[in-house]
């Protein structure tokens, strides 16, 4: 993971992405692509079965066992209890995938936090909190939102199933180097505006293709001021901005988080901190694209359509449908009309969770809105799904679960839940959901379900009021 020769590398001006790339570059291939070394490989039940099967067919074993960490998250039911077993999973495909993950991890000797573990949870939540995500790493997982770990100054990216097999077998990945983009967030946000609003605003501004072919580094005094949880939310949704990688340079906030969550001994930690402090873009590093945004001008954001870029201010009006064919299709699917106010829409369900917004900070912010109130009678169901066993335990120790349950929310066990329709938590046709997840594609949360992305605080507000509104 740490190369003591790193600091003696050519002192040319480089971006953070360039430094991570150079540190992990193995060789240049005739195709023009490169092999890079992978430090950490996260696995879950959906994209790993075929990869393990491929290893068996080729009679290959994983090359470096301790680099791999597994947990089931996408398919797991979030109503489980302490005595739950895989036999109780009703959906046959989901059951097979979870069982196969168990079998494969046991067979190959890979560390797994299984469905019965107190540390089970969404892979991008448990990695950092259990100390497996360390600044300076290259990290991959068969999940696009692996970019979350870039908040720690890691080169982290999602990969496909065939690549999962390749990483298991060789601890390397074949990729092309990306271009560099710098997004500078400056200023102090208005009350009620969170990192989720900031990243939705960026996606609205540059579009879901704005970061194509780039690694986005997020910087500026706003980034420096926010917590690791908030940074993870921003890097998580770099993917929705079109980028493959989102990055934030490590600083004292990062180091303090890692110190409190890491299992590194003191000698290694002391050396590591010196290395981590070098992980920042040089003052005169050249970026292919640069964007500056004053966050003090941003209101809470809510999506109205079927793409994360279809976001507007919470008190704004639906844009003209004649703007494009995509707008027409999105408006029809979502059951909205141009010039209609978001604040006029009546919601059916509320989901607080996902790898974007299921950490303890997210639950605390939502609980502040909910405290002492009741879920509106028009809301059919409001659920809170902690991102991990550790988050659930901490929330319960703080009494957050009681706040939610007293208000009429349903308190669940960890998992991806209603972020995607691969488990029992789904929308029925035409139900409108206030969701803290990262994608609002057609059918993402269930057949013909209508998803509006927003922050945990705004989702909590919707649960209490039945509609979006002013958080102040």
Image (cartoon, rainbow, N blue to C red):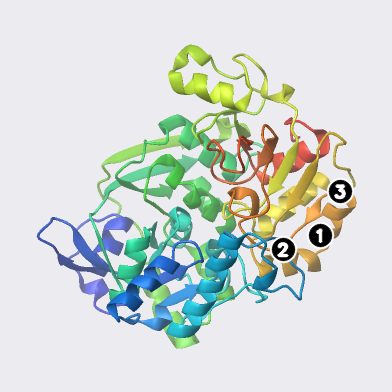
Decide: few, some or many residues near mark 2? Use Cα within 10 Å; few <14, some 14-19, many ≥20: many
Residue assigned mark 3 = 408
- Numbered disc 2: secondary structure: loop
| Residue name at image x 47 percent, y 36 percent | 202
Q: Position of residue 218 (x, y in %)?
A: 43, 48
Q: Nearer the viewer, residue 197 or 418?
A: 418
* Upstream in sequence: badge 2 or badge 1: 1
Q: Nearer the viewer, mark 3 or mark 1?
A: 3
Residue assigned mark 1 = 401
Q: Quadrant of residue 208?
A: top left
* Upstream in sequence: badge 3 or badge 2: 3
Residue assigned mark 2 = 413
Decide: few, some or many residues near mark 1? Use Cα within 10 Å; few <14, some 14-19, many ≥20: many
Quadrant showing the N terminus: bottom left
* Upstream in sequence: badge 3 or badge 1: 1
Q: Are marks 2 and 1 in contact (CB under 8 Å)?
A: no
| Residue name at image x 70 percent, y 39 percent | 458
Judged left or right of residue 354, residue 83 is: right
């Amino acid at each position: 993971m740490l190369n003591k020769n790193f600091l003696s590398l050519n002192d040319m001006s480089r971006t953070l992405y360039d430094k991570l790339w150079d540190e992990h570059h193995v060789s240049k291939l005739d195709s023009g692509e490169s092999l890079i070394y992978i430090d950490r490989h996260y696995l879950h039940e959906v994209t790993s079965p075929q990869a393990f099967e491929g290893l068996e067919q080729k009679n290959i074993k994983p090359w470096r066992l301790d680099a791999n960490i597994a947990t089931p998250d996408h398919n797991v039911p979030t109503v489980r209890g302490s005595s739950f077993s895989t036999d109780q999973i009703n959906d046959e495909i989901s059951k097979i995938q979870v069982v196969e993950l168990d079998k494969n991890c046991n067979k190959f000797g890979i560390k797994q936090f299984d469905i019965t573990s107190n540390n089970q949870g969404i892979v991008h939540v448990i990695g950092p909190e259990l100390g497996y995500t360390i600044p300076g790493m290259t990290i991959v997982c068969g999940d696009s939102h692996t970019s979350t770990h870039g908040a720690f100054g890691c080169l982290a990216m999602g990969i496909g199933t065939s690549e999962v097999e390749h990483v298991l077998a060789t601890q390397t990945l074949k990729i092309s180097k990306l271009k560099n983009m710098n997004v500078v967030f400056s200023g102090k946000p208005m009350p009620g505006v969170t990192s989720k609003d900031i990243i939705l605003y960026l996606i609205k501004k540059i579009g879901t293709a704005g970061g194509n072919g780039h690694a986005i580094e997020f910087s500026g005094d706003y980034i420096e001021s926010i917590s690791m949880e908030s940074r993870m939310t921003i890097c998580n949704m770099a993917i929705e901005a079109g980028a493959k990688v989102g990055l934030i340079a490590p600083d004292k906030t990062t180091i303090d988080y890692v110190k409190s969550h890491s299992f590194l001994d003191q000698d290694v930690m002391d050396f590591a901190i010196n290395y981590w402090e070098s992980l920042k873009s040089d003052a005169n590093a050249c970026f292919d694209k640069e964007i500056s945004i004053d966050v003090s001008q941003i209101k809470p954001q809510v999506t109205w359509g079927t793409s994360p870029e279809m976001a507007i201010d919470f008190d704004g009006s639906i844009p003209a449908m004649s703007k494009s064919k995509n707008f027409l299709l999105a408006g029809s699917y979502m059951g909205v009309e141009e010039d209609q106010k978001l604040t006029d829409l009546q919601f059916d369900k509320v989901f607080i969770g996902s790898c974007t917004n299921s950490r303890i900070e997210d639950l605390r912010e939502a609980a502040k809105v909910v405290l002492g109130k009741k879920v509106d009678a028009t809301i059919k169901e409001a659920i809170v799904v902690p991102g991990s066993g550790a988050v659930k335990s901490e929330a319960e120790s703080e009494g957050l679960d009681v706040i939610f349950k007293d208000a009429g929310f349903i308190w669940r066990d960890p998992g991806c839940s209603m972020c995607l329709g691969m488990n029992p938590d789904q929308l029925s046709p035409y139900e409108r959901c206030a969701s803290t997840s990262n994608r609002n594609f057609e059918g993402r949360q269930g057949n013909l379900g209508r998803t509006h992305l927003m922050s945990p605080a705004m989702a909590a507000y919707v649960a209490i009021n039945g509609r979006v509104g002013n958080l102040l």
